[in-house]
Image: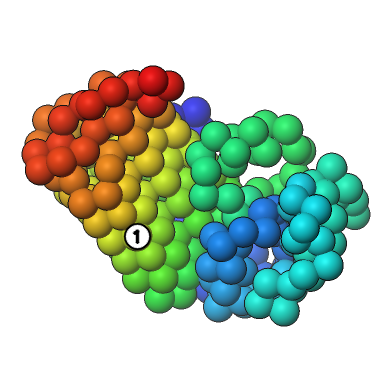
Amino acid sequence: MEEKGQKIVAVSTRWRDRSVDEVIVIGGGGHAKVVVATLFEAGYRVCCIYDDARERWGRSIMGVPVVGAIDEISGYRRAVIAIGDNVGRRSIAERLDLDWLTVVHPRAYVDSSVSLGCGTVVLAGAVVQPDVRVGSHVIVNTGATVDHDSEVGDYVHIGPGAHLAGSVFVGSGTLIGVGSAVLPGIRVGAWAIVGAGSVVTRDIPDGQVAFGVPAKPRRSVCG
């Protein structure tokens, strides 16, 4: 994990900085709709959305306009990256010098002992249990759970309904697919992919695509 992270002290909107309510969103695809809705529920005002896809300019998401390309961002400091692709999120985070907002949906549960990195989003119905460390720009998606003493690296995406048992380690940039499960104490390497509905019973090396019940490495991510 590249950064120790930012501690969240409550689940509701009480934890956030009420002095700054305005935020922009980067990314105008389907995931942006969920992020914008989460920001609204957490009490933020979403000013606008930036996306490099020209066909999205002039459209709106949840009533928020998509105003232009990412390089055109000006006059704003606080932002959230709403891009599901882990490589894409990392590219933007490394490219832009902005104040990355950490957001927890009011109907998620995050224990007060949890550490969340900058730019991380915890969506509705998610549960993050005691003494978990989550890196920066992580997505803990709808209904996902991370149990006690687990460690989740930067740029990870834990898909909807996926479950990490206690003391699981997930390396940076890895995707844990929809509805998958990782057993206690398992290590999933960096920039790996665990396919939807898989059950991970053994460690997965870096950069491997693994799926099945039990999940087995099938090929490299690049292959």
The answer to whether any part of residue 196 appears in the image is yes
Residue at image x 34%, y 35%? 193
Callout 1 secondary element: loop
Q: Return the x and y of residue 220 as percentages of the image width and height.
A: 34, 21
Residue at image x 77%, y 58%? 55
Q: Return the x and y of residue 157 as percentages of the image width and height.
A: 42, 46
Does residue 76 appear to the left or right of 29 in the view shown? right
Question: Label 1 crowding class (10 Å Cα cut-off): few <14, some 14-19, many 20+?
Answer: many
Q: Nearer the viewer, residue 131 or 143?
A: 143
Does residue 143 appear to the left or right of 95 in the view shown? left
Does residue 163 appear to the left or right of 12 in the view shown? left
The image shows a total of numbered marks equal to: 1
Q: Name the residue that disc number 1 marks.
A: 160
Residue at image x 75%, y 51%? 53
Res. 22 image quadrant: bottom right
The quarter of the rendered structure image containing the N terminus is top left
Q: Nearer the viewer, residue 187 or 88?
A: 88
Q: Amino acid at mark 1?
A: Pro
Does residue 102 appear to the left or right of 11 in the view shown? right
Res. 94 image quadrant: top right
Residue at image x 55%, y 34%? 87
Res. 192 image quadrant: top left
Q: Return the x and y of residue 173 as percentages of the image width and height.
A: 44, 34
The answer to whether any part of residue 6 appears in the image is no
Q: How is the image coloured?
A: rainbow
Q: Return the x and y of residue 128 as percentages of the image width and height.
A: 31, 57
Q: Is residue 177 above or below residue 144?
A: above
The quarter of the rendered structure image containing the C terminus is top left
Q: Nearer the viewer, residue 177 or 121?
A: 177
